[in-house]
């Protein structure tokens, strides 16, 4: 009996997976173009005022305190908006600097240092109308932020209810809250920043934002973002249509890049994550909201951590695309771990990923239904290449599971376990594993046209010829 003759084999076909992948690619293009258009549609303020703050007597306002900078901000605000330039020097801030609509705050690079010197504050810079109607067109760029001596709680830049903001070329060190945070904010761009100590957060219905080209390192605190590098999360509601691209995340205590709390249509692409203690990148069902759906994880490099598409029993991830990623030597802290985890997820496409030297299984699909696992390469794992655990109606096709080490460690190329059933396993290549047989437990699962196509049931080995009878 062939798979098409078996009404119980209802897995998504490879054509369905390609169509879904194409749809996500088109969404990526649309969001990038649309967000660029929206950002440019926010008009620049004509005839904006410019005030210079300096410490050497060359400024319109001369001084070395946050109050001097705030005075300049208030001045241009009273004139409808404008630019505040802060020249090099250390400026001690006794409280947060507050920016209103149409204000740009610009330093001269890392030589312009803002340092918190008063009571603990959540952020050194924030927008003025923090919990009221939207501020627009706020920019902060080209300066450094440091905590003051002995400060326990200090973040960098936080914007709440802002549309069309930009935070760029900021350098932070030693922070123990978020380096940059958006809340209820949209159409903002966070780019070219170097963040150390605290990560980047997009929280509470923040949407249509771009986070790109940032370097995030040494996030070790368990503060607001739980030590994550980049966090897109719900709370008051899901974040959506955010693009996280071309960032580098190194040595974080939590997750490198996390999309959770019901967020949807988010794109995580072309990032590098190395040294995350927990997951390198994940889609996670959490926070009592719907699990993420219609999200894409594409063309990322993750070293020493895994990628997880992991919902919960009542919060199942739907229609995720995970494609073109490289996962190298995944670990969970110092523990061995699977390379790519698909858990409580349905109708997802996992394609063209490369997983190398996983401490456990290269790829695990568990408690998940109707997914397409296609054209992945899994090599040199310590247990299975690809494992289906309590998984139903999945299509596993055109994958390569092999071991090219002098002494192979990958026990089995591809196997079902638990209550897996109704899966279609076809056109896979299994080479130089310790056992190249396909392990099946589901009586209605089918393995056809694999190389080799030897199948191991609990009752023994059944060849492809025997299966056709």
Image: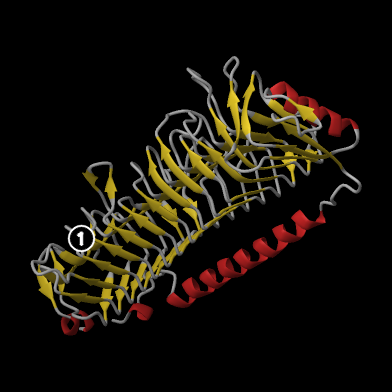
Q: Residue furthest front?
A: 57
Q: Which residue is at a point 71% across and 49% down the rendered structure image?
A: 187
Q: Which residue is at a point 16% across and 81% down the rendered structure image?
A: 466
* Residue 310 visible somewhere in the drawing: no
Quadrant of the rendered image containing residue 182: top right
Q: Which residue is at a point 39% across and 33% down the rendered structure image?
A: 220
Residue 134 position (above or below residue 341)? above
Q: Quadrant of the C terminus?
A: bottom left
The answer to which of 94 and 90 lies nearer the viewer is: 90
Q: Which residue lies furthest to the top in this view?
A: 119
Q: Which residue is at a point 19% across and 81% down the rendered structure image?
A: 464
Quadrant of the rendered image containing residue 424: bottom left
Residue 148 position (above or below residue 369)? above
Q: Where is residue 196 in the image (x, y as percent from the top left)?
A: 47, 38
SS assignment at label 1: loop
Q: Position of residue 225 (x, y in %)?
A: 49, 34
The answer to which of 193 and 183 lies nearer the viewer is: 193
The answer to which of 171 and 249 lies nearer the viewer is: 171
* Left or right of 328, for residue 174: right
* Left or right of 57, for residue 113: left
Q: Count the marks.
A: 1
Q: Badge 1: how crowded within 10 Å, few (<14), some, or many (20+)?
A: many
* Residue 251 visible somewhere in the drawing: yes
Q: Which colour scheme is used?
A: secondary structure
Q: Quadrant of the N terminus?
A: bottom left
Q: What residue would you read off at disc 1?
A: 381
Residue 179 position (above or below residue 331)? above
Q: Where is residue 48 in the image (x, y as percent from the top left)?
A: 88, 43
Q: Position of residue 30 (x, y in %)?
A: 67, 65
Residue 109 position (above or below residue 32)? above
* Left or right of 151, for residue 341: left
Quadrant of the rendered image containing residue 170: top right
């Amino acid at each position: 009996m062939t798979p098409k003759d078996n009404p119980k084999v209802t897995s998504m076909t490879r054509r369905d997976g390609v169509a879904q992948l194409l749809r996500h690619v088109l969404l990526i293009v649309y969001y990038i173009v649309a967000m660029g258009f929206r950002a440019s549609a926010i008009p620049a303020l004509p005839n904006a005022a410019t005030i210079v703050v300096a410490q050497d007597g060359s400024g319109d306002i001369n001084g070395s305190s946050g109050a001097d900078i705030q005075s300049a901000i208030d001045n241009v605000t009273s004139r409808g908006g404008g630019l505040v330039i802060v020249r090099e020097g250390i400026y001690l801030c006794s409280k947060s600097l507050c920016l209103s609509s149409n204000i740009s705050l610009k330093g001269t690079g890392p030589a312009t240092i803002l340092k918190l010197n008063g009571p603990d504050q959540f952020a050194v810079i924030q927008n003025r109308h923090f919990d009221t109607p939207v501020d627009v067109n706020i920019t902060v760029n080209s300066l450094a932020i440091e905590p003051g001596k002995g400060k326990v709680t200090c973040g960098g830049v936080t914007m709440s209810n802002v549309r069309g903001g930009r935070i760029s070329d900021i350098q932070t060190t030693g922070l123990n809250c978020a380096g940059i945070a958006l809340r209820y904010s949209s159409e903002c761009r966070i780019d070219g920043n170097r963040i150390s100590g605290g990560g980047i957060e997009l929280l509470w219905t923040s949407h249509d934002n771009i986070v790109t080209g940032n370097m995030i390192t040494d996030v070790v605190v368990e503060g607001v973002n739980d030590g994550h590098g980049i966090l897109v999360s719900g709370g008051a509601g899901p974040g959506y249509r955010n693009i996280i691209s071309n960032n580098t995340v190194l040595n974080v205590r939590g997750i490198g890049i996390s999309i959770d709390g019901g967020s949807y249509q988010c794109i995580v692409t072309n990032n590098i994550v190395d040294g995350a203690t927990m997951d390198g990148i994940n889609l996670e069902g959490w926070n009592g909201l719907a699990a993420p759906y219609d999200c894409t994880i594409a063309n990322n490099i993750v070293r020493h951590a895994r990628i997880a598409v992991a919902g919960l029993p009542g919060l199942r991830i739907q229609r995720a695309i995970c494609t073109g990623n490289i996962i190298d030597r995944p670990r969970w802290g110092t523990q061995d771990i699977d390379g790519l985890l698909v858990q409580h997820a349905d109708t997802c496409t996992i394609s063209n990923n490369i997983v190398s030297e996983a401490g456990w299984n290269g790829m695990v699909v568990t408690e998940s239904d109707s997914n397409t696992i296609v054209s992945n390469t899994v090599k040199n794992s310590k247990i299975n290449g690809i494992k289906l655990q309590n998984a139903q109606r999945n299509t596993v096709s055109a994958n390569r599971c092999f071991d090219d080490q002098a002494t192979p460690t990958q026990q089995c190329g591809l196997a079902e376990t638990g209550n897996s059933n109704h899966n279609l396993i076809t056109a896979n290549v299994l080479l130089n594993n310790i056992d190249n047989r396909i392990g099946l437990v589901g009586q209605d699962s089918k393995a056809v046209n694999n190389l080799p196509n030897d199948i191991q049931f609990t009752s023994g080995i059944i060849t492809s010829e025997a299966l056709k009878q």
